[in-house]
Image (cartoon, helix red, strand yellow):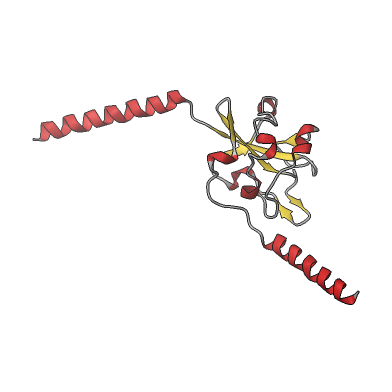
Amino acid sequence: MKENLIVLSLITLGLVTGTVSANPITSDLPSSTYVVKDNLAWTWASPVNVQHWISNELFAPSFHSGWRYATQAEMLNMPTLEEFGFGAINSAAYWNSAYTHVDASDFEKGHVSSRWGHDVWDTFYVSSIPEPKTYAMLLVGMGLLYLLARRRAERML
């Protein structure tokens, strides 16, 4: 009995220590961790919606460049559970110190938010995706700069 208690204590200590020392992934999010809908990238960031929950720390969306809280209007048009692959598409490991997955049952119950404050709700962040027009304007502008530089170089010869 005493040996079982010691083993259980060591396992518990290992789990607690491992959870406390875990860190979120700091690299940019790969496209496999978010869903694009209406020129917004949506990421399922956490299975909780408070900054500190037990041993987990949930970081603000700004922890990764370009991400922010979704507005209430945007939340009305967020991707569906199916679009998130029933939770398979998520980035919990990029914003949480302990959690690496999300809970699809919270989504089904409507317990989703884009602001901290509901401990058992799931958190979603968004990032703006440039429209194709933006890229076209950038390419036209770079083309014009190239032509001007080329013209200037020809005059100097």
Q: Is residue 25 above or below residue 67?
A: below
Q: Quadrant of the C terminus?
A: top left
User: How many numbered markers are drawn?
Assistant: 0
Image quadrant in which you'd find residue 86: top right
Image quadrant in which you'd find residue 77: top right
As drawn, which residue projects farthest toward the top? Answer: 133
In the displayed structure image, the side of residue 62 where residue 15 appears, left or right? right
- Residue 48: x and y in percent read 75, 45
| Observer-nearest of 52 and 29 | 29
- Residue 6: x and y in percent read 84, 74
Q: Quadrant of the N terminus?
A: bottom right
- Residue 22: x and y in percent read 66, 59
Residue at 61% over, 38% down = 68
Q: Is residue 95 above or below residue 39?
A: below
As drawn, which residue projects farthest toward the left? Answer: 157
As drawn, which residue projects farthest toward the bottom? Answer: 2
Residue at 37% over, 29% down = 138
Residue at 78% over, 71% down = 10
- Residue 14: x and y in percent read 74, 67
Q: Is residue 138 above or below residue 62?
A: above
In the displayed structure image, the side of residue 93 where residue 153 appears, left or right? left
Residue at 73% over, 54% down = 56
